[in-house]
Structure formats: C-alpha cells, structure tokens
Image (cartoon, coloured by chain):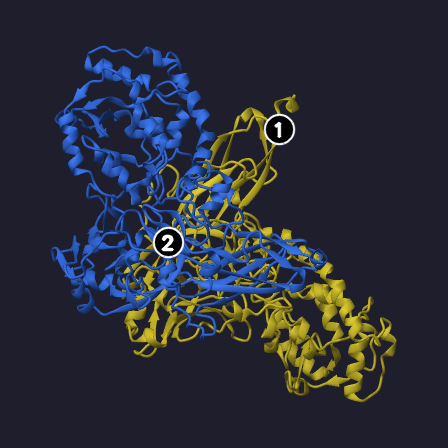
Chain colours: A blue, B yellow
C-alpha cells in the first residue's frame, strides 16, 4: 500500500528524468536493444549487455524506494550512467553467450575503483554505475563482491518486479555452476522470522522491519500508553539478546573501556524513573504526502506514545566510566550503537550532544524497564537509551555500545537521514551536510477524536474533541487552541497530564517537561454549520507555535510534520434521520 | 501617532460598552446634567456632582490607554460604575457651590473600603469606582489620598484631554486653599527631564518613558548593533546612579545578604563576555494591531538588537553568596529589582527560573559593559542583567537587588503583563494566572530590506532581500527560507554570524546560540511579476518554525508576534521610465 503510493508519485517524477537523460545521450536510441553484440571480448560484451538491457527510467525511479532509513538516489545527479530510456526490458532468458565468472573474479570487484560486482540467483551484475543512485546510499557497497540475497532479505522493499528490472540492466554474466552450488549452502534465512508477536490492533506501515502505530482514538485513551500499543519503529530485525550474557561497552573516556552487565546496570547505579513521550521524526508524514510525495513510511498521527521508563542515568554511567569536565574540551557527542544489525554486521546507530547526555537535568536513561516491566523485545530488551525531549531515532534500542567522541555518529541515520530541509530542496539539490541532525523536536499536537470524515448527529448538540500535544527539549505544553470553523475562532482546550480521574501530576521543573499532555474540548455544535473543520494547535512554554499549513514546511524526507492538525466532520441534521 | 491609532480602535469598541451601561442604568438620562443639586449634604452633593459629569463612554474608553506596562481595563466588567452615557461634558468652570475638603479629609480615603480620593490642580476626586477600570491596574491606588501630579508626570499618556474628561466625572469638591498652597510647594519636577540624549535616527514609540527602535534598514547593517541605535525599552525614568556609591544586594541565600560594589563585581569575579540578542516581547506588535487593536507600544520590526556584553556571571555571584544544591530544593526563581522607580518607590522587577540563573551553560551576566564600553545610561548603567535567550523584559537594567526565592517576582511586569494568550481571549475573559510569564522567546525573523512598498526597477534584474533571524533559549537559527511569490516557492537565504567581510564566528555550543543571524538572498526578478510579496521564515535547530499568519496568534497584549514577515514590493517596468 505504501509502496504503491510511492510508485504513483515517482511515476510523476519519471518523465523529467527521462528527458534529461535522453538529452545527455541522444545517440542511444530507445531501440538500443538491437545494438547488442555477442563479441567474446569480456569488457565489450559486458557493456553491450548492459546497454541492451537499459530499462525505462520510470522503472528505475520507481525502484529507487527503500523501505526504511534509506536515502532516495541523492546521487542521481552525480550519476555517470547517462544512457537511454527504453520502454521494453529484455528478459534474462533470451540472452545467450553470456560470460561465465568465478566467485573469485566477482570478489575482486568490491570498490568503485575496481568496479562493484554482485551476484543474485546465479547471475553476475556490475552495479558500479548504480551505486550513486542507490536509495540506501553507500550501504550497497557492503554487498560488493558477494551475494545480494542476504541484503534483500533484510529490506523487504527489494521484493518488487521493478527492482529486478533495474538489476537486469546491470547483468554482465553468470556465476560458475560450482560457485553457485557453494552459495546455495550459505543462503540466509529470513532474519525477521523470530521477531516478536505484536498486538493485532496496530496499523502496520512496514512488516520487515516492523513499523506500526496504534489507532488514534485508542492512543488518547491512556495517558501512559500501554507497551503493547506503543508505536513500533524498527530499522532492522529485532535482535535476541541473552540478558545473562548481555554486555554494554562504554568507550572514549579516560578510564578506558567500561563493560557493564545488565546486573551491573541495575545494581551499581541508582534507578531513575522518567515519564517521557517518544515521537518518530516521521509522525504525520502522510499529511506531507498529500502535498507532494515524500520518502518514508506513511505514518498517520500516532507515531508518538508516552511511557514511564526506568533505568540507570547515562550521566551516572559516564561519570563511573571516567567522565569529567576535561572530557568536554575535546568530546562533544555521545554515540550509541544498537545490537540490531544487518547481515554485514552494521548496527543501528545515532548520537546526541554530550551536554544533553551529562546534564543533571537531561534525564537521559539507560532504561531496562518500560511501564514498570522489563523492556519488551520491540522496545529494546534488555537495555535502550531514552533521551527525553529528543526525536525517537536517537533513543537507540538494544543498546550495545556507548562511545564518547569528538564527532557525531557516522551512521546513515545520523548523517543522511532524519534532517529537515526547505520545501524548495529536492533530491537533486539536497546536501545532507547543510542541515543539523534532528535532536529536539518542535511543538506538536493532533486530534485523535473525532476522526476525519466522522459524522455527528445534530441532536447531540455538542461535539467533544480530543487529542495530544507535546514539545521537544523539555518545553511544557501550556495551551492548546481548538477551532471548529477552520481557524476563524478559537477556544482553549482543557489539558491533562495524568490518567483520567487521577490527580494532576505536579508541574515538571522548567525544561524537563518530557511527557505529553492530553487535551479535550466539548463545545456546542455551531447552529448552522453542515460541516466542521476542526483544527488544533499547541503552544509550549517558550511560546513556540505550530505552523498553519503543511506545504510551506514540506520537505523531501517528510519529517517534522507539525502543521495545525485538521479533521472535517459532517453534521447530520435530524431531518435526515427521518 | 500611536495614541491616535489606539483611539481609533477604541472608538470602535466604545458603542458596545455604552449600550451595556445604558441598559443597566436606564433611568439616568443623557441630560443628567440638569439633575445636579446644590444640597449641602456632603455625600449627596458628591454623588450628584459625579452623576452630572458623566462623560461619553467613548471618551472613557479612549482614556483607558496607558503608555507602558499597564493593563487595559481588565476589570471593566467588574465595574460597579453603572452610570449613563452623555455626549456633553460639563467643564469644571461652570460648577458652583462645590464642597471644600481639607488634605486631612482627602488622606482618609486611600482604600476601596474607605473610598479612593485624589487631588489634581486643586480639585478633589473620588475615583473609587474608576479603580477597577484603570488601565494601569492597581497601581492607581498608590496615588490614593494624595496628588495625581507626580504620577501623571511619570506616564505622559495622561497628558490628554480624554483623561481630564474622565477625571472630571469623579470630581466631588475642591481642596482647601491652604492645602492647595502646601501642594504647590512639593510639586514634582518632570522625572524624565534628566533622561540621556538619544540618537536622532531612532523612531520613537513613546517619549516618557523612552521607547524607540532603529530604522530596519540600519538595523541589519551591523552584526553587532551600535549601542546608540540599539532599541530602547524603558518602563520608567532613567535613574542616575553614582558608580562610586553603587551597591548591589544579593538576598535569599544561606550566606545572608551579600552587598557588592561596582568595583567588587569587576574585580572579585571573572569577566565573562557574551554576544547576545535582546528582543522585546512586543517586537512586531504593529502587525497584530493591523488584525485587531492590541494594548501596548506599536513596535515595528526593530525592537530587537544584538550586542556584546561583559560582566560577572550571575552564577559566580550566587555561588559567592552561598548558593549550593540545597538551595534548589526550596528556591526556584531569581528575582531582579531595578533602580528605576516611580514616585512611590516601586521599582521595575522581573524574575527568571533558578536553573537558568545557576547553569554553567546559561551565561547569565551581571553586565557592566556593552560593546566594550561602560553600559550607556539607557541600557542600565552601571549594571544590568543579561539573560541570553530570554525576553528583554527579564534583562533588568540599573540592577539594584537580586533575590533568590521560592516564588516568581510579584511585579506587575512578571504577573500581569508579558504573557501570551489564545486569540479567543479578550480583556473580559483573560486570567493572567493561566499563562506562564514569557521567558524564552520563539523563533523569529523579519525582512529589513526592501521596505514594504518599495519599488524595484525591472532593469535591476534581481532583488536583494536582507533580514535578521533569531530564536530564544539558545536555539541556533539553521535556515531562513525566502519566498518572492507570497509563499508558493521558497529559496534558502545565506546566513551570517559576524560582521560583513569578517570570518564567520565559530559555531556556538548546543543550546548556547544567543546571537542572531543576519541573512541575505539575491534572486532574479520573476519575469512577469508586477509585484512581489516577499516572505521570510526561519527555522531553529529544534526545527521550530514560524507560524504562517498573524490572526491565529493574535493576543490581547500583542506580544510574541512572530508570524512570517511579509513585504510587498512593486516592480517598475522600464517602459514606465521613458
């Protein structure tokens, strides 16, 4: 469903690119398939074979999708692959006199200098020219000189015909029968097969890796979101970690490497509890998709949840590992590495500024409990980082390593993802170095009830609107304005910071309001309206306000979608019922 | 000019209120002047006199203006003064048989229970019923039982015919000749007469107290604003402080009261220098006035400036005065009292959260230098507080006292001013306790060039747009988007954090970006446009964005005006020149 939507949009982008490449290489005609030569000279045959199999650029672009955490062809404009579009794709079966390569020969090609070759189902591909266009960025190089299968097993997005079409273009030969047999023996199993069971109410945005959100109306039922319906945002398969042998490494401090067991974390440091809301940078991305297609999971308004987290304070652990004011002179970041990894061993990673990590008021936890129980597998069992006030992506789960360093994490997710850009920036012009990695998130709110398109009976006389509001950086939500008439007039909603019926939680210290507020407004139905355009907008205690509309904050990655939230509700007049 | 604008708006409000009061007291006719009685009975004569002189409510409302720091008739709905409107005002000269009171008698009336009497130019007024309507709030009680002259000398806004009209309504008699003579002897001189000279380029919003801003195009000429054109925002007359006898008191800490001379501040504590932008909460208020009249000085876009401040760190001074972690258990605020005071001795005051004051990263200064020189008189000589990232109002000038306390400052400016409200909140419904005092300000930007209404020649082929951008709380501006077509398309401006031609300043540590960025964009003139609607909007490193439009953030005090800034520019075609 998501992929389908993306393809639709990319099809729109397609023709432009097609034209461009046609301009650049006008001599290569759409009928290039007839130029194929059966020359026995390796190099020439490989090039000819490739040229013969150039697919439609529409297909290339449609294939430039990655399920998660990947960059869309940022290097498209760097591409040297200036070749013609063709509307027909030659199937592999029709090719004859294909060169045969040994695995040893393939393995020699594992860099841009030596060429980048890969194998897939017995065929050999020279994908050197595709590297710069790969949606997942440089990560494709990890497969260089080897088989694609284990990578594609990780990212289900590759299981599409378009992807095979693109690959076919780069075929240069076949793997020797002997080496094909060897490969069969090491084929990886589905790394997601042991992912935990999930609550059936979750709305799944991606199955592998698992990404899902609760229905909005259920989300705002609880001030503390039950763990089972807390939104899930995995970048990789859920790792299985044995708590008995679990080890956390802390590096980069004067004391050398500190290694802590789960037991150490629980017994050597005070247990600290924080109620904190986590939100995915892509929450409400679907609204940006309505303006213009963006890259990423099509989250609704519920990629946000609130839980109580307990664990050791990162500050305490860093102090135990030798952190002191001297360190701050050279180090500026704390990197986290997850134990979730792809087949090459590359782990999920992120970093936060050092001052947040060591601040007494930062409340950063190495959490081993969520809502009073061991962390669930989907939320980082046995230990995750909780960085209150900071985008979900930095709250690294299944934490394996902490590194205090001068530089930010070099991970894809820190460097080339989870950043915001101007609405005028597209994939041809984006420079990921020009924007800071998202840390604190801006003021946010949304309406969880009524749903868009709901019908209210006129006889009900009033309407109740509910939602959530939250701001990053510990900034407390101080007001939510609600409009029933598309923003002409506004009423102030009632805020709640505890479960319904419970006493209000005490006000958090300044700068440490980590948890959301739920809000509610019951107002009379406007006498003559046939439809209500309900809007909410929140204000935090730095008086930050949400922008009015989506288009001016649209960005190619679809992050930071925090415009006023709007739902339309129809009023059913009593006459209609009779 | 400002007052004129305000009056226009208030006139619009007028009739509504008039009707209301007419409904409540319909028996008191507009011709009530004829009901005046010359009875010798004090009480009856006073009441009759008052009734006879009821002015137009339009005039009352027009008079409900205060120049600065005052609340607009928040108590209007509480008023018990339900009396009739009349379109003619009887002048004092026509009244005969007026009761005579001694000063001793007047002095007995200095509370709501005993009645609130004041004298002005020999007449006695019972203003009990006006107290709740006074734009300056309760402060009017400070004059109870005495003469108005010294108060009116403080606030030039009272020098208007409307104000005299209102006062006339409350006349109950005259002061004995003997007591009038005594008053002459103590008449205060103009407390503003010794205010410093100011730069003639400043645009004055209020002369007494002095409030002025530089022309926008001059503002963005310098990264560091020259002190002479740094916006001036005074609440009271500039006090004259002798540096030799200056004493700063620090109270509320275990060490007892610490008293520091200017020399102590300069020699006992390390000198710390911070470049920080200060912005008035009312900057860009004039744009809110265009939506609907608000209360306050009609600032343009230049109630913001950037300077280099040097002084002792507040943190260091508090530590020297006995601050320790124990204090934070009971104290949460640090109050500042200025040496600027009104005739009753009430000083300007404000407070900030304790954690900001004591944080190593808060950079709060007790500044004695601005741009490398002694503080100018208008900016707090000899010592002011500089609270980087925080609204101007908390950066108390002419600092006299620091109090570490459990509670916020009880000053008018902390409690009943400088707070934000929903656009749906009006002076009838506002509850100042419901909103937090403004501390950190939200993301802001504005276009300093071209000016609204400017004309660009088509032959110029391109247009250069300049402006400033800043965010509160140490959040760094990371991007400014500029649109030439009313927000349809956006371009990214170039940011600058040093004087033109100088090397860029090093990036500030996270959360300590206290200074603004100047920005600039030169873009081709759109080929067919006859007019450009130029817009800017900024983004800080928490990815906070400015709201699109003014109306939805309008608030009755006209603070926090940070919607996209828009200017319209006409393109003059070459044909027109011939």
Tell me if mark 1 has few (under 14), some (14-19) or many (20+) residues whose alpha carbon lies within 10 angstroms of its own.
Answer: some
Residue B367 image position (x, y, % from top left): 37, 60
Q: Examine the image and state in which quarter residue B334 appears.
A: bottom left
Residue B442 can be seen in this image: yes
Residue under label 1, please give it. Answer: B572
Question: Taking B412 as reference, is B356 left or right?
Answer: left
Circle 2 SS class: loop
Closest to the observer, B561 or A424: A424
For the point 80% across and 84% down, the residue is B45
Question: Taking A323 as reference, is A228 left or right?
Answer: right
Position of residue B126 relative to residue A393, above or below, is below
Question: Taking B414 as reference, is B452 left or right?
Answer: right
In the rendered structure, the residue with mark 2 lies on which chain?
Answer: A
In the rendered structure, the residue with mark 1 lies on which chain?
Answer: B
Tell me if mark 2 has few (under 14), some (14-19) or many (20+) residues whose alpha carbon lies within 10 angstroms of its own.
Answer: many
Residue A67 image position (x, y, % from top left): 35, 41
């Amino acid at each position: 469903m998501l992929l389908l939507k993306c393809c639709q949009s990319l099809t729109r982008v397609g023709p432009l690119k097609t034209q461009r490449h046609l301009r650049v290489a006008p001599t290569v005609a759409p009928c290039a398939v007839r130029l194929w030569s059966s020359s026995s000279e390796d190099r020439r045959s490989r090039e000819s074979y490739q040229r013969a199999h150039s697919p439609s650029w529409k297909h290339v672009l449609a294939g430039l999708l990655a399920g998660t955490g990947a960059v869309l062809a940022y290097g498209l404009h760097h591409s040297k692959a200036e070749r013609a579009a063709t509307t027909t794709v030659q199937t592999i079966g029709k090719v004859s006199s294909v060169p045969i390569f040994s695995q040893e020969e393939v393995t020699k090609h594992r860099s841009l200098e030596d060429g980048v070759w890969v194998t897939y189902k017995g065929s050999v591909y020279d994908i050197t020219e595709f590297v710069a266009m790969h949606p997942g960025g440089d990560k494709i190089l990890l497969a260089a000189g080897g088989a694609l299968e284990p990578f594609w097993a990780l990212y289900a997005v590759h299981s599409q015909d378009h992807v095979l079409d693109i690959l076919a273009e780069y075929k240069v030969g076949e793997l020797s029968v002997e080496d094909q047999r060897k490969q069969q023996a090491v084929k990886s199993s589905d790394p997601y097969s042991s992912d935990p069971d999930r609550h059936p109410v979750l709305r799944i945005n991606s199955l592998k890796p698992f990404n899902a959100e609760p229905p909005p109306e259920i989300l705002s039922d609880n001030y503390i979101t039950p763990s089972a319906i807390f939104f899930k945002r995995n970048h990789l398969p859920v790792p299985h970690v044995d708590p008995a042998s679990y080890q956390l490494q802390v590096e980069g401090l004067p004391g050398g490497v500190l290694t802590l067991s789960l037991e150490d974390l629980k017994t050597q440091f005070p247990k600290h509890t924080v109620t904190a809301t986590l939100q995915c940078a892509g929450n409400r991305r679907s609204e940006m998709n309505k303006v213009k297609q963006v890259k990423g999971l099509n989250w609704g308004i519920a990629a946000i949840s609130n839980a109580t987290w307990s664990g050791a304070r990162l500050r305490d652990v860093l102090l135990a590992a030798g952190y002191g004011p001297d360190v701050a002179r050279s180090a500026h970041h704390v990197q986290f590495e997850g134990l979730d990894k792809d087949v090459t061993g590359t782990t999920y990673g992120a970093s936060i500024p050092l001052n947040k990590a060591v601040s007494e008021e930062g409340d950063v936890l190495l959490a081993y409990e969520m809502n009073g129980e061991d962390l669930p597998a989907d939320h980082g069992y046995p230990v995750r980082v909780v960085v209150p006030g900071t985008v979900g992506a930095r709250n690294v789960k299944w934490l394996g390593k902490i590194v205090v360093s001068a530089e930010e994490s070099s991970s894809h997710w820190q460097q080339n993802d989870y950043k915001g850009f101007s609405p005028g920036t597209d994939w041809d012009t984006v420079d990921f170095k020009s924007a800071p990695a998202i840390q604190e998130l801006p003021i946010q709110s949304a309406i969880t009830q009524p749903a868009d398109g709901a019908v209210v009976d006129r006889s009900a006389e009033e309407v109740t609107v509910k939602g959530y509001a939250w701001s990053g950086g510990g900034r407390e939500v101080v007001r939510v304005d609600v409009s029933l008439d598309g923003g002409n007039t506004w009423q102030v909603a009632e805020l709640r910071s505890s479960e319904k019926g419970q006493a209000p939680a005490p006000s958090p210290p300044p700068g440490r309001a980590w948890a959301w507020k739920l809000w509610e407004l019951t107002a009379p139905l406007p006498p003559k309206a046939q439809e209500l355009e309900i809007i909410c907008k929140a204000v935090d205690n730095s008086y930050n306000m949400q922008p009015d509309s989506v288009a001016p904050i649209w960005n190619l990655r679809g992050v930071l979608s925090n415009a006023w939230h709007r739902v339309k509700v129809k009023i059913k007049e009593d006459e209609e019922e009779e």
